[in-house]
Image (cartoon, grey):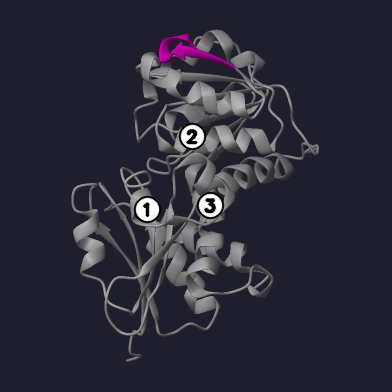
């Protein structure tokens, strides 16, 4: 049995259904990193510091999911554009000094790239041309940390107007200044108003947890086929497809599940944690990981 010399993991709460261990361990095998291992640990914002404090120099990095993407920020140094600008990170990379002590922690946000690639690749797969910029309107459903990354991803697609739909619209107003820094105009609406505006949306990202968007899906069911033309990314991958994805496709749009975002945000994580140049990653790594995901979904 190969000795494990390098470790990484995904942290969050809940975490039991995470597909990240499948993704990362598949990548390690494809890269010949047989002494690497990746698993999951249920950790919340109150226990995150204690968890990191107990790690040793075998640990190379962590993936962070709900509710830790903001909680990790005071513990490390933002090290790419999106972690610095958004104050949200889903990746922590450790740099150890010797064999003991606390590591220096570099923080990255790879969610923005994951959202962009999940959307644009879904459009290409459907045979729709993807312009250099999509422009038009975007809709974000939800107002948490992933919604922050979705707004940033919209900026990479040159979306000009963003609507934020949330269960608590008063909280969603806090995201408006971020969108405005990217030159987007902003509206904030309640979830129940989504059916009134979806026909004009080029890109929609639902950042709500599993089943939380089911009521929105039910509201869309009254619309006629052909009512939507845009592309939906639902960051949930359990159940698969979600109720929102099912109705979106029925209405005429493209719908892609959260496993695609998870795949594309994980590939740069793997590069950062293993210290591998992006150009040195196996060229078929995405298809290898996607095949592994299909086997477990």
Gap between marks 2 and 1 measured at Cα = 15 Å
Q: Is residue 1 left or right of residue 181?
A: left
Dot 3 crowding, Cα within 10 Å, few <14, some 14–19, many 20+: many
Above or below residue 149? Residue 175 is: above
Dot 1 crowding, Cα within 10 Å, few <14, some 14–19, many 20+: many
Q: Residue 264 at what x, y percent from top left?
A: 57, 54
Q: Quadrant of residue 159?
A: top right
Secondary structure beneath label 2: helix
Residue 242 can be seen in this image: yes
Residue drawn 38% across the image and 46% down it: 69
Q: Please give the residue where the numbered disc 2 appears in the rendered image.
A: 148
Q: Which residues are magenta?
A: 186-194
Above or below residue 171? Residue 35 is: below
| Quadrant in which the N terminus is drawn | bottom left
Gap between marks 1 and 3 measured at Cα = 11 Å
Callouts 2 and 3 close, C-beta under 8 Å: no
Q: Please give the residue where the numbered disc 3 appears in the rendered image.
A: 110
Residue drawn 35% across the image and 35% down it: 210
Q: Please give the residue where the numbered disc 1 appears in the rendered image.
A: 64
Q: Earlier in the sequence, mark 2 or mark 3?
A: 3
Gap between marks 2 and 3 measured at Cα = 12 Å
Q: Nearer the viewer, residue 146 or 210?
A: 146
């Amino acid at each position: 049995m190969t000795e494990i010399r390098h470790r990484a993991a995904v942290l969050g709460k809940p975490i039991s259904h995470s597909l990240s261990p499948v993704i990362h361990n598949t990548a390690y095998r494809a890269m010949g990193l047989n002494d690497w291992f990746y698993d999951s640990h249920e950790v919340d914002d109150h226990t995150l510091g204690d968890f990191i404090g107990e790690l040793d120099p075998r640990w190379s990095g962590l993936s962070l999911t709900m509710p830790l993407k903001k909680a990790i920020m005071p513990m490390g140094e933002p090290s790419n554009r999106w972690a610095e600008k958004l104050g949200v990170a889903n990746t922590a990379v450790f740099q150890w000094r010797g064999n003991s002590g606390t590591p220096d922690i570099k923080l990255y946000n790879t969610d923005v790239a994951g959202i962009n690639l999940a959307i644009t690749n879904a459009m290409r797969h459907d045979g729709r041309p993807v312009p250099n910029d999509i422009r038009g309107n975007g809709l974000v459903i939800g107002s948490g940390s992933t919604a922050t990354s979705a707004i940033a991803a919209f900026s990479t697609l040159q979306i000009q107007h963003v609507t934020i739909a949330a269960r608590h619209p008063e909280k969603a107003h806090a995201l408006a200044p971020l969108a405005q820094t990217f030159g987007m105009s902003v509206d904030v609406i309640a979830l129940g108003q989504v059916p009134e505006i979806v026909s004009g949306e080029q890109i929609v990202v639902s950042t709500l947890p599993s089943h939380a968007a089911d009521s929105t899906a039910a509201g869309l069911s009254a619309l006629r086929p052909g009512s939507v033309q845009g592309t939906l990314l639902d960051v949930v991958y359990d159940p698969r497809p979600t109720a929102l994805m099912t109705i979106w496709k029925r209405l005429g749009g493209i719908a892609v599940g959260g496993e695609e975002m998870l795949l594309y945000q994980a590939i740069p994580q793997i590069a950062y944690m293993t210290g591998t140049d992006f150009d040195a990653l196996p060229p078929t790594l995405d298809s290898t990981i996607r095949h592994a995901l299909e086997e477990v979904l």
